[in-house]
Amino acid sequence: MRPAHQGAPGLAHGGVLATALDETLGSLNWLLRTIAVTGRLETDFRRPVPVGSVLHLEAEVTAVAGRKIYSTATGRLGGPEGPVAVRADALFVEVKVDHFIDNGRPEEIRVAMNDPDQIRRARAFEVNP
Ligand SMILES: CCCCCCCCCCCCCC(=O)SCCNC(=O)CCNC(=O)[C@H](O)C(C)(C)COP(=O)(O)OP(=O)(O)OC[C@H]1O[C@@H](n2cnc3c(N)ncnc32)[C@H](O)[C@@H]1OP(=O)(O)O
């Protein structure tokens, strides 16, 4: 957590933490080789997260039903064995690439899709505030 992630003095902003959880959960879709967007994100803030601390994030898919992907993410202070500070349950909904072409900026989607580098293609739209 860096100073740019601050909300209250010395503490991470909840919206930034929710973004981090959403991004971690969104990464699972690349592993499933599906394109999906967040339909629902329920976040629990259990402990304050100090600026300067390390937040260890992990996520897993809990169920898939048709286009619906249920997943959960946990953020622990300091490392994988640290106390749970934040967690989220999410529902992602699988969409066609047209979702982004029709609603977003089609040129950028096409450029990313045509990139021969698979890793760069997968991470083309990563948010890292
Ligand atoms: C190179 C490739 C490029 C690709 C770029 C990738 C970038 C990736 C970036 C990722 C960035 C990171 C992530 C981000 O930040 S993604 C950005 C934030 N999310 C969005 O902008 C999503 C906006 N919402 C929508 O577009 C639509 O509502 C979606 C697509 C989600 C569904 O509308 P659609 O008309 O398609 O489907 P449907 O309405 O028939 O619903 C289908 C099923 O889902 C169920 N349901 C839906 N919502 C909810 C809900 N809230 N709670 C409970 N259930 C819900 C619904 O009941 C139904 O269930 P069932 O009746 O079938 O049982």
Image (tube, rainbow, N blue to C red):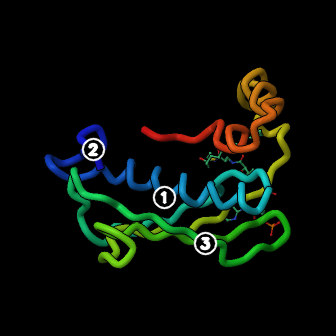
Q: Which badge, 2 or 3, is on the more N-terminal residue?
A: 2
In the rendering, at what x and y percent does residue 118 appear?
A: 76, 43
In the rendering, at what x and y percent does residue 127 appear?
A: 52, 40
Can you identify the residue that label 1 sits on? 21
In front: label 1 or label 2? 2
In the rendering, at what x and y percent does residue 19 appear?
A: 47, 50
Give residue 76's quadrant in the image. bottom left
> What is the distance, in whole Å, between disc 3 and disc 1 at their CAs?
11 Å
Disc 1 marks which amino acid? Leu
In the rendering, at what x and y percent does residue 65 appear?
A: 81, 73
Is residue 4 rendered to the left or right of residue 106? left
Give the camera-side residue of 79 and 126: 79
Look at the image and tell me whether residue 102 can be seen. no
Quarter of the picture holding the C terminus: top left
Q: Residues within 10 Å of mark 1 (few under 14, many from 20)?
A: many
Q: Which badge, 3 or 1, is on the more N-terminal residue?
A: 1
Disc 3 marks which amino acid? Glu
Disc 2 marks which amino acid? Arg
Can you identify the residue that label 2 sits on? 2
Is residue 44 rendered to the left or right of residue 63? left
> What is the distance, in whole Å, between disc 1 and disc 2 at their CAs?
16 Å
- The mark found on residue 76 in the picture is none
Vertical comparison of 32 with 118: above or below: below
- The mark found on residue 60 in the picture is 3
